[in-house]
Image (spheres, helix red, strand yellow):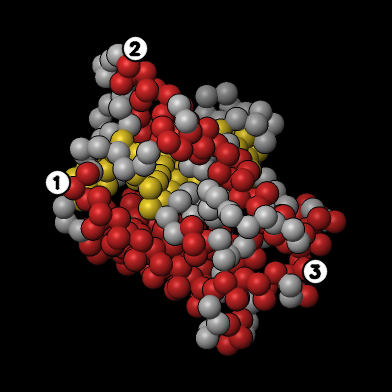
């Protein structure tokens, strides 16, 4: 049995790629998911997986993830699938980037605040998240789940786990401040109510909760924000999109650099494995596809794009297992030293 932890990035509707990866991993009886850390869409995927798994095993987890993303697709603008069903996702993204509705919505976000809606404000995902069976999501059984959000006042990461995970925690993890009001949650330790924004600003996702001694050393990162783009962004849309990708990768890159530094110290004998854990890092991604997409397809869940992303996730997971399944619990498959030069 290969025991692994999952680190699930946020990225709006692009989280359907992660759905495809998880669907493949859940079908492999040799793989046990011991821990999950997630942000935004990654946190939603993790919660849906855990609730479904405790309800009806691996098939239950797959069914729960399918249900969640079908609900997400139902929130698309009327008629969008008729327009885009036969169009490749990259072309959909370009069409949406330069469409009047998207540009008008983008400009409106820059000029107004979600607080301007007053009593008419309603979070569009609340009705979906409320249905996630939190008695199962918060249960001690099954994979340990960690959900990251950002404390607005302190700027620090807050990781929710166990009974702390709720509809509010998941909505906080996915709270883009230009779209949604900050989610307020009472801190049980201080008794104060704190406001939270998207966890991607401080941990996308946070890896450190997975360093517990009772969890495996292997961390499989499902990356949906491209780490590298070869083409220089020059249009306003391209520049804004790349800023989004860099900012939402920054915290993960910092944590991986720290992992690489600790690994070098262990290899040099400056630290022992008893003092620090040796984290075996793996990554499943499809940067070629993701570089053809943009913020537009993150924001608007077009069913045809969601299904294409799922298929891409399935293909990436199968490719990873074919190449690296034997490496799980043996060695990492991401060359962190080469990536960071440490």
Where does residue 65 sit, x and y in percent of width and height?
A: 38, 63
Q: Can residue 299 be seen in this view?
A: no
Q: Which residue is denoted by mark 1 in the rendering?
A: 1
CA distance for labels 2 and 1: 32 Å
Q: Are marks 2 and 3 in contact (CB under 8 Å)?
A: no
Q: Which residue is denoted by mark 3 in the rendering?
A: 104
Front residue of this view, candidates 246 and 248: 246
Q: Which of marks 2 and 1 is nearer the N terminus?
A: 1
Front residue of this view, candidates 320 and 161: 320
Q: In this view, does 74 lie above or below 64?
A: below
Q: Can residue 177 be seen in this view?
A: yes
Where does residue 98 sit, x and y in percent of width and height?
A: 74, 72
Residue at 67%, 36% in the rendered image: 152
Structural crowding at the residue carrying mark 3, measured as other residues with C-alpha within 10 Å and reported as few (<14), some (14–19) or many (≥20): few
* Left or right: residue 181 compared with residue 261: right
* Left or right: residue 217 compared with residue 132: left
């Amino acid at each position: 049995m290969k025991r692994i932890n999952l680190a699930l990035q946020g990225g709006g509707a692009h989280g359907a790629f992660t759905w495809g990866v998880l669907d493949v991993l859940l079908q492999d009886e040799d793989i046990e998911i011991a821990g999950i850390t997630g942000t935004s869409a990654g946190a939603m995927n993790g919660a849906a997986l855990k609730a479904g798994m405790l309800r009806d095993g691996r098939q239950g987890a797959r069914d729960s993830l399918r249900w969640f993303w079908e609900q997400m697709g139902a929130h698309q603008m009327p008629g969008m699938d008729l327009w885009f069903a036969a169009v490749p996702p990259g072309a959909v993204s370009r069409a949406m980037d330069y469409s009047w509705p998207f540009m008008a919505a983008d400009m409106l976000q820059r000029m107004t605040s979600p607080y301007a809606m007053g009593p008419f404000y309603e979070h569009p995902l609340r009705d979906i998240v409320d249905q996630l069976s939190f008695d199962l999501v918060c249960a001690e059984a099954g994979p340990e789940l960690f959900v990251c959000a950002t404390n607005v006042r302190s700027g620090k990461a807050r990781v929710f786990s166990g009974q702390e995970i709720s509809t509010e925690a998941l909505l906080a993890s996915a709270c883009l401040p230009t779209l949604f009001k900050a989610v307020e949650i009472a801190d049980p330790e201080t008794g104060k109510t704190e406001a939270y924004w998207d966890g991607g600003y401080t941990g996308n996702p946070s890896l450190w909760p997975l360093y517990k001694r009772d969890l495996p050393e292997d961390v499989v990162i499902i990356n949906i924000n491209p780490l590298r783009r070869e083409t220089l962004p020059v249009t306003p849309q391209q520049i804004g999109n790349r800023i989004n990708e860099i900012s939402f990768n920054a915290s993960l890159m910092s944590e991986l650099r720290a992992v690489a530094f600790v690994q070098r110290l262990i290899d040099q004998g400056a630290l022992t494995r008893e003092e620090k854990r040796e984290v075996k890092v793996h990554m499943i991604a499809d940067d070629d596809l993701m570089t053809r997409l943009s913020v537009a397809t993150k924001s608007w869940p077009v069913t045809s794009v969601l299904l294409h992303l799922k298929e891409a996730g399935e293909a990436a997971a199968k490719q990873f297992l074919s190449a690296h399944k034997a490496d799980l619990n043996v060695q990492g498959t991401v060359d962190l030293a080469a990536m960071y030069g440490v």
